[in-house]
Image: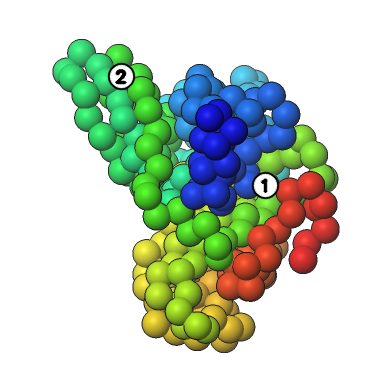
Amino acid sequence: MLQDLLRERIRRWKIFYQVLPRGGYGLLHLLGCSVGDGGNLLQRTRCYYFYDTATPCNKREPGSGCSAIKGLNRMHAILGASEACIATHPSDMCVALAALEAKVHVAGPAGERVIAFEDFHRLPGNTPQLDTNLHPNEIITAVVLPAQGFAKNYSYLKIRDRLSYAFALVSVAAALELEGDTIRQARLALGGVAHKPWRDTAAEAALRGQAANHTTFRHAADLLLRDAKGYAHNTFKIDLARRAIMRTLAQAAAATPQSQSNKKIR
């Protein structure tokens, strides 16, 4: 019975389970009983200056300034940043949840509500100290995945400085529904590039109805990155993201998802 449940969950939402850590924590996710899911959604940036209390940081101390803009910013945002903050969201799991259009169920003194995943995290704007749209005294009670899991044509690619215990420079979750060589449905989300998991519905719309080929993937990547902006040390991430998007879409189209045990990029 339990094995059948696990197999069904993995079969339906393969892209989600592809990003999970191996070992016991991953098993808890499979069982649907991990208290870490909510914590993963709420984890804070890994910006060096956020943790260095000797330097100004608007996220830690609003109004003090953003040290990263003119500092060491190799890991920082290329999309959706502001003059107040260029930090990135560190999660892998949230990138897959964004691509799948998950729903976040929350509860608090005012009652229960459901937040679309794309609305759960915030861009920095002038209030970078606010990471999410979770209200004070609210807690996450559930994260619900939709029935459509894109179980055949999907991939998750994570580009990082080393193969383990490293956050993404760029990560991409891609999911396609194909009819022959034509893309009928597409989902595309990026990590490591913005203050929240980055999803661009215009880029997804540009994929629909098109042939699943290099030209289509390049156009979608260019569209998604049309407003990308680099800083002194992270401009390379724009081209890295473009290549990663194209590679991940190609993996998804070919139904050859990136292996999470053999890290060599296919």
Total labels drawn? 2
**Where residue 168 is drawn, which disc sits there?**
1
In the image, is 133 to the left or to the right of 252? left
Circle 1 SS class: loop
In the image, is 198 to the left or to the right of 252? left
Circle 2 SS class: loop
Q: Quadrant of the C terminus?
A: bottom right
Question: Which is more N-terminal, label 1 or label 2?
Answer: 2
Comparing 21 with 204, the one in front is 21
Q: Residue at x 73, y 48 (%)?
A: 260
Q: Residues within 10 Å of mark 2 (few under 14, many from 20)?
A: some
Comparing 93 with 15, the one in front is 15
* Residue 95 in sight in this render: no
Above or below for 147 versus 22: below
Q: Which amino acid, by three-letter code, is at mark 1?
A: Ala
Comparing 151 with 171, the one in front is 151
Q: Which residue is drawn at 30% across and 26% down?
A: 106
**Residue 105: image location, x then y, percent:** 31, 30
Give the residue pinned by disc 2.
138
Above or below for 197 versus 217: above
Q: Residue at x 80, y 39 (%)?
A: 164
**Where residue 91 is drawn, which disc sits there?**
none
Q: How crowded is mark 1: few (under 14 residues within 10 Å), some or many (20 or more)?
A: many
**Residue 242: image location, x then y, percent:** 61, 69
